[in-house]
Amino acid sequence: MAVHNGAENLPDQLASIKEQSLGNWRLIAGDDKSTDASRAVLNEFARMSSAEVVEGPGKGFVANFFSLLSLPGLQGPVALSDQDDIWFPDKLERGLRALDEIDDQRPALYCCRRVNWWPRFNRRKPSRTFPAAPSFKNALVENIAAGNTIILNDAALRLVRSTLAAARDVPFHDWWLYLVISGAGGQVICDPKPSLLYRQHEDNLVGQGEGFLASLKVKRGVWDGSYSQRIDRNIAALLRIKDVLTAENRDCLHDFAAARNGDFTTRLSLMRKSGVYRQGLISRIGFWGAVCVAKV
């Protein structure tokens, strides 16, 4: 669990972890230089439960999660947790049951839907579904593996740990996990059943719900260049670990990167050849519009 100034909502999240139907868990919380009562809340929980608190690097949530995943002796399966959600009681059990269906030697990432939750209005709405299969070709242009739902098996954790030095500049930890696991030929499981209440508030760093306002935020990110810049950072990191990727996915990455730097005709031709795609018809139309105006 990555923590930074989360004292207000931490007790609810911690209580939901304590009430998991699967009892054999251990919590490691990285407190990232909190200035509120977060450390006291975590320490009190650790005195009563199987938990420990470690120092975060003080460089933001991505570095905090990567620091936690790098801890000596850490073994999978590993579930990632935000500081302000509420897990459903069977979250861990259901995720681990799905991972148990995968060969132990194959890297696998489990993720699922969430219930977007506005406590102030007592409003709840399930997150969107993803009609297309997860793949590296999808991961290159969007992330569907929400970090607060992710569980990695031990093979996936070992793979991810081997790439973290290369991932020093990536924009999001969960997007990187989706890229690495799918790129290396691992299994990505997207469970259509929600596993938690995803608290919506003004302090959310990313992913504030869905709908019209969220759509406007995405479009603004495309037009102001921030979406393209994030892809730049992902590609730079992927090129550092290209030997980890399957041959097919290396070719896809090459075509995708070349397409982004080509003229209009080359851009369309190579982007089509790469096979990259987003989830859902409207999102795909928007993506190809962005390709046409060199905003990808």
Image: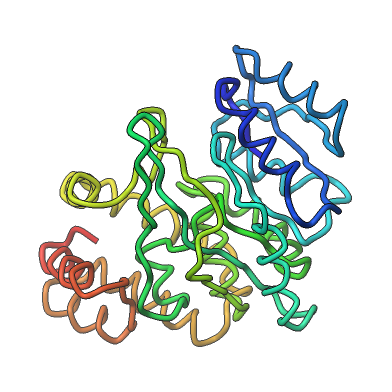
Please tell me in which quadrant of the rendered image residue 15 appears: top right
On screen, residue 277 above or below 287:
below
| Residue 72 image point, x, y percent | 86, 46
Q: Residue at x 83, y 29 (%)?
A: 46
Q: Nearer the viewer, residue 195 or 145?
A: 195
Q: Nearer the viewer, residue 117 or 7?
A: 117
Q: Residue at x 78, y 27 (%)?
A: 45
| Residue 138 image point, x, y percent | 39, 73
On screen, residue 182 above or below 124:
below
| Residue 147 image point, x, y percent | 54, 52
Outermost front residue? 122
Q: Is residue 140 left or right of residue 167?
A: left
Task: Please state, as top left, top right, bottom left or bottom right, where the C terminus lies in the image.
Answer: bottom left
Q: Is residue 113 left or right of residue 76?
A: left
Q: Residue at x 72, y 57 (%)?
A: 161
Task: Please state, as top left, top right, bottom left or bottom right, where the N terminus lies in the image.
Answer: top right
On screen, residue 233 above or below 271:
above
Q: Is residue 292 left or right of residue 40?
A: left
Q: Residue at x 75, y 47 (%)?
A: 70
Q: Is residue 141 left or right of residue 83?
A: left
Q: Nearer the viewer, residue 243 or 18?
A: 18
